Image (cartoon, grey):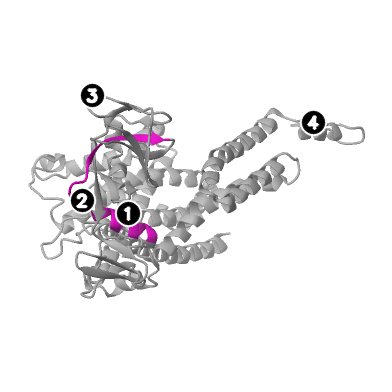
Amino acid sequence: MVVDVREAARANAPGRPRREITTAFVVSRIAVLAVAAAILLYAVPPLVAAGSWVSLGLLCAASAAIASLYLTRRFIPAKYLIPGTVFLLAFQVFPVVYTVTTAFTNFGDGHRGDKAAAITAIETGSVRQTPGSPEYGLTAALRGDELVFLLVDPATKQVGLGTAEGLTPLPGAEVGVTGKVLKAPGLTVLKAPEAAARAQEISALAVPTDGGVIKANGLSRAVEGRAALVYDAACDCVRGNGDTWTADADQGYFVNAKGEHLAQGWQVGVGFDNFARVLTDPTISGYFMGVLGWNVAFALASVFGTFALGMSVALALHNPRMRGTRVYRILLILPYAMPAFAMLLVWRDMFNRDFGLINQLLGANVDWLGEPATARLGVILVNLWLGFPYMFLVTTGALQAIPRELTEAASIDGATPWKAFRRVTLPLLLVALTPLLISSFAFNFNNFNAIALTTEGGPFPAESPQVGGTDLLITYTFRLAFGAGGAQFGFAAAISVFIFTIVAVVSAVAFRRTRKQEEVYA
């Protein structure tokens, strides 16, 4: 703050215009610097511990740049542009770039790490108890943030500290009558519920020994064993169980002579394989165009339906002879004020064939969500109910910005109310609302919740249980990428790129038409 005082002194010196240091000015600087300092203090220790000196240098340089920028009165535009640019890069550019790069890899279950991690997982996962080896009493503990084992030797009752580096003696540990370690110097002993929450980490930890490795057998016992599968760097292969699996850099797997591979692989680049799979795999491409057609129809019906209904209601309430408009407006925006996910679940139950409210009111026995036609009509109606209040609000605002003199002049010239609306009001509304209609199309094109929470993509035909009658591309992608076959992030990213391209092309064309409208009615 010394810099601020000096600047204030210079600013208030004779011959210079007086500049006051406002409370908002000081508070804004303190807030920005406090956030930068908090991030720096939070991120420095783990970066130092990991030896990430390049990342640490970049972080310190960024913090210094932020401090120098906000401790001076110069560069006023940058003070506003840089935070926005950072958020744009972090929340828009980076996710898009990361998704595109992931689409060219085999990232997913079995391919989440590098080759070294895959080798470790293969060896530790194949550990089998060595005959005659001791069974240790196991207690999970934390050394800082690191998970460790406290192992009680059944013969000597001595406690050892088991880590990924090996087993070392641990003097001073207190062992209870049940064989569990109660206290250990410098360590935090995990209670049973805490250990259960870390069960996956406990089962994955392997403590190397001269005779093999020690692995957990449940949460209270650990055994020493040997790996049935061992990596041989000389041949870049895994040997064991009477077979040999050689590393295949193209697939990211260890493959044997029969073409079979081990379950654990590593992440590699696969080029355009994921994109080719979308277009050539008959189980995918055979349904892709059908899903795409319904996807476009759903998005268009949702946009034009909500716009038509919202605009009609807004026009009715915009009439100066209308009374009680405030009450009507409050009632009309209630669907928009309620949580969408809860309303979708309510509508799903209303469409139920046996106890749904709709069938009870109509005295019918229609299986609304059991047939493709009625299920599609149902989700469009639900989306219409949820979406029209938004269109009503934006149309109301746009109508209030249109001078009444224009419609009055059209009436004087002999135009009917319909012609005045079609020739004057509607074009002016479209100039203002077309960008919102385009964004609504993009939203509904990827409206995962509307399908997942009502029909779950169904109904599913017997010959194709993989794709349902109401599936959008986003729900179809989710089922393909994260279904029974496990998570396939690379493949999901490839389909996401297709979806992004389709929406981007439609939006670009629509925005171009919007600019033409603006030129005509400017």
Q: Secondary structure under badge 1?
A: helix
Is residue 142 shown in magenta?
yes
Q: Disc 3 versus disc 2: distance between alpha carbons?
A: 27 Å
Nearer to us: label 1 or label 3: 3
Q: Disc 2 versus disc 1: distance between alpha carbons?
A: 64 Å
What span is colored magenta in the figure? Answer: 116-143
Q: Residue at x 92, y 35 (%)?
A: 15
Q: Quadrant of the C terminus?
A: bottom right
The residue where tag 1 is placed is 302
Q: Disc 2 versus disc 4: distance between alpha carbons?
A: 74 Å
Q: Is residue 428 visible?
A: no
Q: Which mark is residue 130?
A: 2
Given the image, on which type of amino acid does mark 1 rest? Ser
Q: Earlier in the sequence, mark 4 or mark 3?
A: 4
Q: Which mark is residue 5?
A: 4
Nearer to us: label 2 or label 1: 2
Nearer to us: label 2 or label 4: 2
| Figure check: 332 above or below 208 | above
Nearer to us: label 4 or label 3: 3
Whether pointer 1 and pointer 4 mark residues with C-beta atoms closer than 8 Å, the reply is no
Whether pointer 2 and pointer 1 mark residues with C-beta atoms closer than 8 Å, the reply is no
Q: Earlier in the sequence, mark 1 or mark 4?
A: 4
Q: Secondary structure under badge 2?
A: loop
Whether pointer 3 and pointer 2 mark residues with C-beta atoms closer than 8 Å, the reply is no
Q: Residue at x 46, y 67 (%)?
A: 509
Q: Earlier in the sequence, mark 1 or mark 3?
A: 3
> Residue 443, percent across and down?
38, 53
Nearer to us: label 1 or label 4: 4
